[in-house]
Amino acid sequence: MEEKRIGVYVCWCGNNIALMVDVEAVSEEMKKLPNVIIAKNYKYMCSDPGQDMIIKDIKEHNLNRVVVAACSPRMHELTFRKALENAGLNPYMFQMANIREQVSWVHTNKEEATKKAKSLISGAINRVNFHESLEKRSVDINPATLIIGGGISGISAAIELADADKKVFLIEKTDKLGGYAANIDLTFPYMYSAGQIIEPLISKVQNHKHISVFIESEVKEIFGYIGNFNANIISKDSFETELKFGNILVATGLKPFDPSGIENYGYSKLPGVITSLEFEKMLINGSIRTKDGDIPKNVAIIHCVGSRNKDYHEYCSRTCCMTALKYANQVRSALPDSNIFQIYADMRAFGKGCEEFYTQSSRKDIMFLMYDQKNDLPVIKKAKAGDNCEMLIEMNERLSGEDIEVPADLVILMVGMEGREDAKQISHTVGVSLCGNEFYIEKHPKLDPVATTTDGVYVVGSCQAPKDIPDSVSQARAATARILATIAKGSVEVEVTTAFINEKICCGCQFCIKVCPYTAISFDEENNVSVVNEVLCKGCGTCGSACPSGAITSKHFTDKQILSQIEGLLAKSLELQEV
């Protein structure tokens, strides 16, 4: 039997862990456990010197198993697996204990936190004794890419991929490309023509030899896995097209908030109250007028309509403030004698050139009035005869603390942005998750902001969260760089910690097929057993926990491994309690 030689490494994570956990005492305690050859602590284990320490010790002390106590495995498990690999050790002979999020960040008593850290690491050490070597697998990559959504993100990504001589299938649900950007007049903060930006890109996409555009079409269903996807596309004339591709890029965009439900604003009841999108149409048509065709003397722009409000959406829609300033500048140019009111909650001018744009706008005789969007929304009412305006906006102005009435002939509601109504359907089709606001969830907000937990599927642009054109284009190009990198390699490694079905025990109930969230299990009618597609399987363990006959085992998460971890944790906890 192989001798177990374990190395244990406790990370300080700067002060994130060391401030609440006595890391030196922890590493000393771990030296006493069976099969532990060496135990050390270091300020940043994930750093190059920290990884080099592990690699050196593996070689010098003939370590064949490693435990690192640090942050969440989601952050750096792959980092440490790579270190093992660089030292010539199978990467799955590794176990991580989370003593940052599960200990130091959630406790206030250092003594108790240190005891808990010792118990968690003890469990990890006990578990790693039963780890087995797993061999990596790879699949070939079909160089074609499916892009769902023909807005600025989808178009930008399509051009990047096609210019690299890769085939692109671009699916657009509506009857034209361009998305939201195709319906605006000028872009902030430099007041460039949106049409002059988007139209050449649309033309290039439509005429590119490597891009196949499907207008008024939807993805009905997608099968397969990274490198080898198949999809059925349905067009308006019900023609079915089958496509094959290696990666998927979701760029479905978002939709504007409907302000009809906010009674304070009287949208759809007061003819002079319009949305920001309706005002864009006025600007594109070159005429700012009231519904009666008159030139408005008083123009009010109300911010955060449907955004940053617990009754609607608590998140910021990001582009509204700068768009509102853009409108104020356009109104001032078109109607130099008009009175312009910016009724805002907070002015958020982030982004290159935006703070300067705010400053310039404030010098153009524009009145800025602040309201409390959490407790006291403005109220728009029809004006009375003799008021010399069409409407009056009643509000408490926060900076002065006074109740005031703002005259208005035209009110522009800066409506927030929200997830599309078909977001859930698309998320099921491509196999990605949604947040509570119906936006797609990225794999990691900092370390992997365009990938998803489904290999080969990327989310870009405003379907992931509200963002402006530059950020949308940046995300699109980031995702295409990732896709081109996998295509250039020709193959990609896939998860090996997958489910395994013992055909001798499988009773053929097919319950595992019903619960699998990745459609990775099929049924072999001839042998009356379920079969796992290991490329599709993500090792989530759902099938194993649901199997009534116990026929399913999750590699790297066997019963023996999990139970030994629990035993190690409890044993150390009891030992420390007695002490």
Image (tube, rainbow, N blue to C red):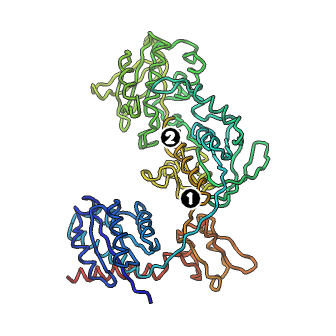
Q: Picture quarter containing residue 43? A: bottom left
Q: Position of residue 112 (x, y in %)?
A: 23, 71
Mark drawn on residue 2: none
Question: Mark 1: which amino acid?
Answer: Thr
In the rendered image, which residue does mark 1 sit on?
Answer: 454
Labels 2 & 1 near each other (Cβ < 8 A): no
- Depth check: 224 or 316 in front? 224
Question: Mark 2: which amino acid?
Answer: Ser
Q: Sequence order check: which comes first, mark 2 or mark 1?
A: 1
Which image quadrant: the C terminus? bottom left
The image shows residue 147, relative to residue 410, as above or below, that is below
Q: Picture quarter containing residue 513? A: bottom right
Q: Residue at x 44, y 90 (%)?
A: 1
- Depth check: 358 or 55 in front? 55
Q: Is residue 380 visible?
A: no
In the rendered image, which residue does mark 2 sit on?
Answer: 474
Q: Is residue 280 visible?
A: yes
Left or right placement of residue 284 versus residue 87 in this view: right
Left or right placement of residue 11 versus residue 522 in this view: left
Q: Picture quarter containing residue 3? A: bottom left
How far apart are the two marked residues, 2 and 1, measured between alpha carbons? Answer: 21 Å
Q: Position of residue 30 (x, y in %)?
A: 28, 78
Q: Position of residue 197 (x, y in %)?
A: 57, 28
